[in-house]
């Protein structure tokens, strides 16, 4: 196995439990192409094995703290362990591997019923594509495996940004079941891997809270809306994407509900229009896309979050619930809470914090690896 020598700073990161070593901390670069390499300190002590990405800023991603052979058995065992940690999930769609959160850096595996959608997000990992596919076939026996490798981080690894069928057949739409609700996911063309699995537990919560008039803002294919339909009298499912709303309408019909109205609009404008019209809701979900894609845009993102939250608070009936989220990694949980305090202060409402909310348990967060956690949220209730 080829070797990389890392600086004291790089070594310290691994020892603290963070799996990444940056380019500036690699003092001797391996000469081999992307793949697994032995990692040593300057004195030649073996620190472990890492995935080597020659062109990335993240040069090494730790796989093990000892020198192991990284072959088919390694991937089968690690992936099997990750799947083994899932259990008791009330859904046919779940995340089987959450990258660094499952000790499998840069690998995402989502199960959507009988098909699997993967993302291979580093050059080092891409070198083991065959072994990963083999392991998934062994453990999950899917009808097809699709790579949603159309993500920008792949460009930084000098990897093609594309969607590719890796095995079998994957249909345009796949029906999944989640806590008694059914919906169609779009693995080839939908956002992310075709479905937002990180919100599963929060959608079940929204279903339990639903009553009266409900609003699912930034609804995508309406999965919160469908969960709220049985408990609510009427639901408004709002999104700016017509394609997502077409599927939302199909998802509503699939479950036999007729009390969901889809509305194609910019949520910023529509929330203001609802306020101007004196509309009120008993439950509101705000699940916007990541407003802060980079650290530099956090300030502007927080202003956007505050705007929609302030409006939503004003739209609540007395006693109404707001489930509000941010999936921007760069917006820290504390900053998100501060934003909510500020929105509540300006809303003129007394808002109770019922509980903080987070990503579903199959998206594990490692304390020392903050990048594994990105979804934060809160369940709020208007007291007056
Ligand atoms: N709640 C969904 C996921 C939402 S993803 C679920 O649980 O499945 C965010 C959605 O916001 C996307 O569907 C995107 O089309 C939509 N969106 C982005 N900007 C918007 C805007 N300004 N107004 C309304 N919708 C917007």
Image (cartoon, rainbow, N blue to C red):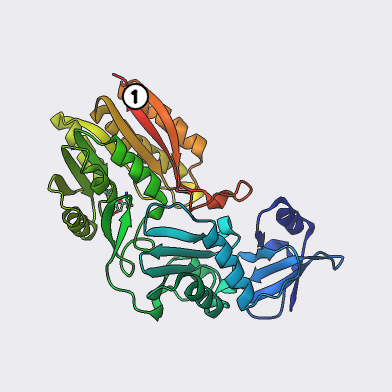
Residue pointed to by mark 1: 346
Question: Which residue is pictured at 45% across the width and 35% down the height?
Answer: 356
- Name the element at disc 1: helix
Indicate whether 92 appears above or below 232: below
Indicate whether 384 appears above or below 381: above
Question: Which residue is pictured at 33% across the width and 74% down the height?
Answer: 170
Residue 119, how many percent across, how many down? 47, 68
Indicate whether 320 appears above or below 224: above
Q: How many marks?
A: 1
User: Is disc 1's CB within 8 Å of ligand 1?
Assistant: no
Residue 243, how many percent across, how many down? 22, 61
Q: Specify whether 105 is left or right of 283.
A: right
Indicate whether 221 appears above or below 142: above
Question: Which residue is pictured at 59% across the width and 49% down the height?
Answer: 366
**Quadrant of the snapshot with the C terminus:** top left
Quick check: can you spot residue 252?
yes
Q: Specify whether 34 is left or right of 305.
A: right
Question: Which residue is pictured at 24% across the width and 46% down the height?
Answer: 225
Residue farthest toward the front in the current orientation of the protein: 88
Circle 1 Cα neighbour tier, 10 Å, few/some/many (<14 / 14–19 / ≥20) = some
Residue 121, how many percent across, how many down? 51, 67
Residue 198, how many percent across, how many down? 42, 51
């Amino acid at each position: 196995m080829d070797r990389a020598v890392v600086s004291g700073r790089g070594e310290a990161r691994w020892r603290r439990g963070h799996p990444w070593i940056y380019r500036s901390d690699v003092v001797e670069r391996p000469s081999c192409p992307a793949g697994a390499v032995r990692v040593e300190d300057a004195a030649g002590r073996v620190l472990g094995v890492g995935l080597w990405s020659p062109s990335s800023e993240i040069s090494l991603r730790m796989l093990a703290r000892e020198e192991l052979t990284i072959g088919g058995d390694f991937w089968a065992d690690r992936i099997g362990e990750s799947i083994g940690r899932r259990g008791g999930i009330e859904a046919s769609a779940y995340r089987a591997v959450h990258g660094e959160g499952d000790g499998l850096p840069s690998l995402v595996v989502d199960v959507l019923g009988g098909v699997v959608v993967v993302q291979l997000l580093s050059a080092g990992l891409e070198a083991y594509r065959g072994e990963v596919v083999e392991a998934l076939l062994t453990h999950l026996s899917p009808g097809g495996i699709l790579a949603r490798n159309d993500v920008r981080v792949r460009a930084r690894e000098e990897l093609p940004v594309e969607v590719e069928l890796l095995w079998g057949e994957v249909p345009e739409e796949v029906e999944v079941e989640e806590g008694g609700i059914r919906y169609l996911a779009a693995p080839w063309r939908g956002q992310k891997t075709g479905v937002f699995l990180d919100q599963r537990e929060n959608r079940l919560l929204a279903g339990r809270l639903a009553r009266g008039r409900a609003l699912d803002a930034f609804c995508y294919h309406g999965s919160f809306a469908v969960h709220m339909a049985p408990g609510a009298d009427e639901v408004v499912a709002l999104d700016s994407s017509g394609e997502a709303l077409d599927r939302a309408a199909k998802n509503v019909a699939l479950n036999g509900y007729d009390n969901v109205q889809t509305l194609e609009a910019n949520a910023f404008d529509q929330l203001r229009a609802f306020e101007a019209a004196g509309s009120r809701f008993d439950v509101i979900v705000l699940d916007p896309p990541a407003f802060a894609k980079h650290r530099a845009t956090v300030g502007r993102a927080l202003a956007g979050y505050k705007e929609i939250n302030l409006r939503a608070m004003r739209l609540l009936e007395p006693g109404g619930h707001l489930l509000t989220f941010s999936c921007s990694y760069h917006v820290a949980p504390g900053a998100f809470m501060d934003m909510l305090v500020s929105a509540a202060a300006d809303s003129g409402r007394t808002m109770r914090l019922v509980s903080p909310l987070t990503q579903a348990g199959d998206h594990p967060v490692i304390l020392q690896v903050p990048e594994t956690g990105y979804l934060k949220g809160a369940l709020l209730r208007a007291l007056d």
